[in-house]
Amino acid sequence: MKLVIDEQIKLGIGQTSVVYHGTLNAESIAAKKSTNGSSLCDESRILKIFKHKNVVKHRGLFELAGGDCLIMELALGGTLAEHLGYGKFSPTQKKSLIQQISSGLGHIHDKGIVHRDLKAENLLFKDMMREHIVIADFGSAQSYRDDVYAENDHEDVDDDEYTFKSDVYLLGLVAFQILRDLRHFDRRRLTGAVLHQGYLDNQDVCGSWEMWRMIIQSLDREPEKRPTVMEFFAAFGAPPA
Ligand SMILES: Nc1ncnc2c1ncn2[C@@H]1O[C@H](COP(=O)(O)OP(=O)(O)O)[C@@H](O)[C@H]1O
Ligand SMILES: [Mg+2]
């Protein structure tokens, strides 16, 4: 195994880490290092579980002199956050992105994991074509068990406890952002009435009523009224092969 990290090339900076470009044997990779001294062991252990084309792939965890280093497949197309708000995506592309994200999240939930930080900054395009998107950043992810109270410390989610349905709420927010091509929005203004009006105002942008209704439902204040990620996914159809 030959790992080379190029600290001159920063792919991104998160709240608690920096991600560098590097190579592992002959493959170009992304190398995540913590900036607050926290371990990347839990993140690595969780990331390793997944095998899905819309979840970033794990390549290894290395102990280096400066601390742990989590190696992942390289996503070269930047984050969704960087590309929203410029009218870049056609209605078909928007639908495909939402299909892919919900398909990836469905796999994560199938494995019993809650992501806890689904947002445009943590959704990465595989390459410059920006057709293939992967879910990244499992730094907040946890195994979820019904019988254990899961504290909710997410500032955008009002749920008493953080469950799979809290991830669905975040999926609804990101789907809304994609369909409306918004960099920023005030999520507290997103009531059912506002969303309903939004659909009536601009059906071209919002897609089918069935898709839009799923977004409204996923943003319900009461977690049990939200769809499961698989129900959400079904409304958007199967992702492209
Ligand atoms: N596999 C990857 N390929 C390319 N860039 C990445 C990859 N993983 C993360 N990044 C970039 O690094 C940033 C921070 O990574 P992230 O895992 O979100 O760290 P944090 O937990 O600190 O938020 C991301 O927003 C993205 O810009
Ligand atoms: Mg992040």
Image (cartoon, helix red, strand yellow):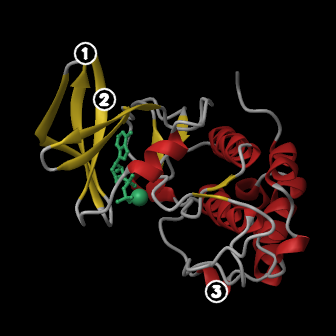
> Which residue bears the numbered disc 1?
25
Alpha carbon of mark 3 to alpha carbon of mark 2: how far? 38 Å
Q: Which residue is found at the position 77% from the left and 74% from the top?
A: 195
> Which residue bears the numbered disc 2?
29
* Residue 187: image location, x then y, percent: 61, 79
SS of the residue under disc 3: helix
Q: Residues within 10 Å of mark 1 (few under 14, many from 20)?
A: few
SS of the residue under disc 1: loop
- Left or right of 186? Residue 61 is left
Q: Are marks 3 and 2 in contact (CB under 8 Å)?
A: no
> Any atom of ligand 1 within 8 Å of the CB at mark 2?
yes
* Residue 142: image location, x then y, percent: 59, 59
Camera sees residue 174? yes
Above or below: residue 132 compared with residue 67:
above
Give amino acid for label 2. Ile
* Residue 216: image location, x then y, percent: 81, 69
Q: Which residue is found at the position 56% from the left and 38% from the top?
A: 55
For marks 3 and 1, give the one nearer the viewer. Answer: 1
Q: Quadrant of the N terminus?
A: top left
For this orientation, the residue located farthest to the top is: 26
Q: Nearer the viewer, residue 84 or 12?
A: 12
> Which residue bears the numbered disc 3?
188
Q: Nearer the viewer, residue 94 or 101?
A: 101
Rendered image: mark on residue 45? none
Alpha carbon of mark 3 to alpha carbon of mark 1: how far? 47 Å
